[in-house]
Image (tube, rainbow, N blue to C red):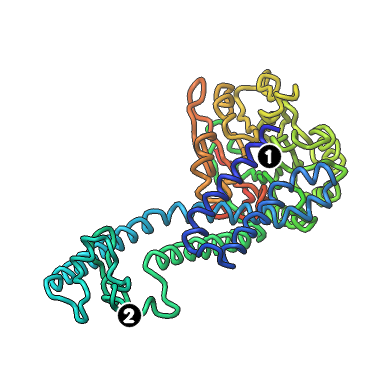
Amino acid sequence: MGFGIAIVVAVAVVHYYLWRRVIRPATTPGSRTRRVAVWALFLLAAPLVLTRAGGRIFGTGFEHFLAWPGYLWLAIMFYLLVFALVMEIPRALALLVVRRIERREAAAASAAGAAGAGAPAAGGELPVAALAASGTSSSEVVPGSSSPASADVAVQDGHPVATDPAGPAPGRIDRRMFISRTASAVVGVGALATVGYGMTTALGDPVVERVPIRLARLDPRMNGLRIAVVSDIHLGPLTGIGHTRRITRMINGLHADVVTIVGDLVDGSVAELGALAAPLKDLESRYGAYFVTGNHEYYSSGGPQEWIEELDSLGVRSLRNERVEISHGGAVLDLAGVNDLNGASYGDGPDFDKALTGRDPARPVVLLAHQPVQVETAAGHGVDLQLSGHTHGGQIAPFNLVVKLQQPVVAGLAAFPRTGGGETQMYVTRGAGYWGPPVRVGAPPEITLVELHA
């Protein structure tokens, strides 16, 4: 409930900011354009707020119906906010220039008015200076005259300023409105173009990253062992079975010795999404396919256990704070897996001691752990390599900068000091799917092929 309220408040704040900085300055009061824009803001926010709640109340069909407009608007809203914030500086500089131009024009008009102040106006009209002193505008009708005293000079704040007697030319807008409309156009076009690019990236084929990693304790006979790593597939209301088929096909094309699924496979129950996971039964590898839970498995209404059983029926083994031996070329390494950190709230958290105690310290251990932040504990247990996901590589830049505040690595390979000497290496995959908006900017979807070397 608290998280939902926070989302509603955040959406309301962002929409108010967009109204104040994008719509209001670029439209005129009471105009049709302003009314349409305001209604559009309100109507687009509705499916975004109702997507998750509607899915829980009315089922996945209703959620699927709302998810596309809701999540797409979430992405567009985010980039409207980003571009609007970026445009604050050039907008402020442009308005500063306009204010200086207006001051110069006012000064010139004042000087022109002062120059003619001493000469009586034709027809007995009062001079501009006298009008200024009396607080009367020179554009007003002077007593005894049937026409304005001066059509091109007016008094503003006690000073004469230049005016256009004919009014603004048809179709012309003042400088401030021009700046506001230009800034709003840049914000809108920039956001839509970015989201369009991000959708093409997110819905396209994942990038295959081939990552050679050297492990000091690896037996040379295991040189070239290939581990396929995929994470954050996020089967859910916006994905179809084609998403799973494509990932399965691409993994099989890598001819991996081991396949690993490092959490966040689903965003729903087996009843809702079981059919979408079915293609995983076709995964091919020499030594098997393995899975560890991510945080989203615990958000499912059925909990992680039903998915563990479902994956087992598909030939994918779950490593529940446990390890298996992988024998290759006459040598052995330990492949271990721990539950996600979120499992602790459900009495099903990670247990490194259970997964790693009692193993042969002379051989290397590769650990599957959904969240990169678990690497500190892994290093304390002498892990050689941790394979993680969770971050999506940030998914939509510049959100990767925020992810960095929570996780030690957003994407790629890094090394950390290991207890007892040496180092624990960690590779963080960007994930093959997406969460929320079907958009990826600066973080294309990924399937990783890790190749181990001594």
Provide the secondary structure element on which disc 1 rests.
strand
In this rendering, the answer to whether 31 lies above or below 336 is below
Nearer to me, 227 or 281: 281
Identify the mark at residue 442; answer none if there is no mark: none
Instruction: Give the amino acid type for the residue marked by disc 2 in the picture.
Output: Ser
Q: Residue 403, percent across and down?
A: 54, 40
Whole-number angstrom distance, CA of label 1 to CA of label 2? 86 Å
Q: Spot the residue most to the front.
A: 144
Say whether disc 1 or disc 2 marks the residue closer to the N-terminus. Answer: 2
Q: Residue 153, percent across and down?
A: 26, 72
Instruction: Indicate the quadrant containing the N terminus: top left, top right, bottom left or bottom right.
Output: top right
Residue that numbered label 1 is attached to: 262
Nearer to me, 224 or 388: 388
Q: Nearer the viewer, mark 1 or mark 2?
A: 2
Nearer to me, 95 or 423: 95
Q: Quadrant of residue 325?
A: top right
Neighbours of disc 2 within 10 Å: few (<14), some (14-19), many (20+): few
In this rendering, the answer to whether 16 lies above or below 23 is above
Determine the residue positioned at 27% across, 75% down: 149
Q: Is residue 179 visible?
A: yes
Determine the residue positioned at 43% across, 54% down: 86
Q: Residue 75, percent across and down?
A: 60, 54
Determine the residue positioned at 49% across, 30% down: 416
Instruction: Indicate the quadrant containing the C terminus: top left, top right, bottom left or bottom right.
Output: top right
Instruction: Give the amino acid type for the residue marked by disc 1 in the picture.
Output: Val
Are discs 1 and 2 less than 8 Å apart at CB?
no
Provide the secondary structure element on which disc 2 rests.
loop
Determine the residue positioned at 37% across, 76% down: 167
Nearer to me, 155 or 125: 125
Tally of numbered discs: 2
Residue that numbered label 2 is attached to: 146
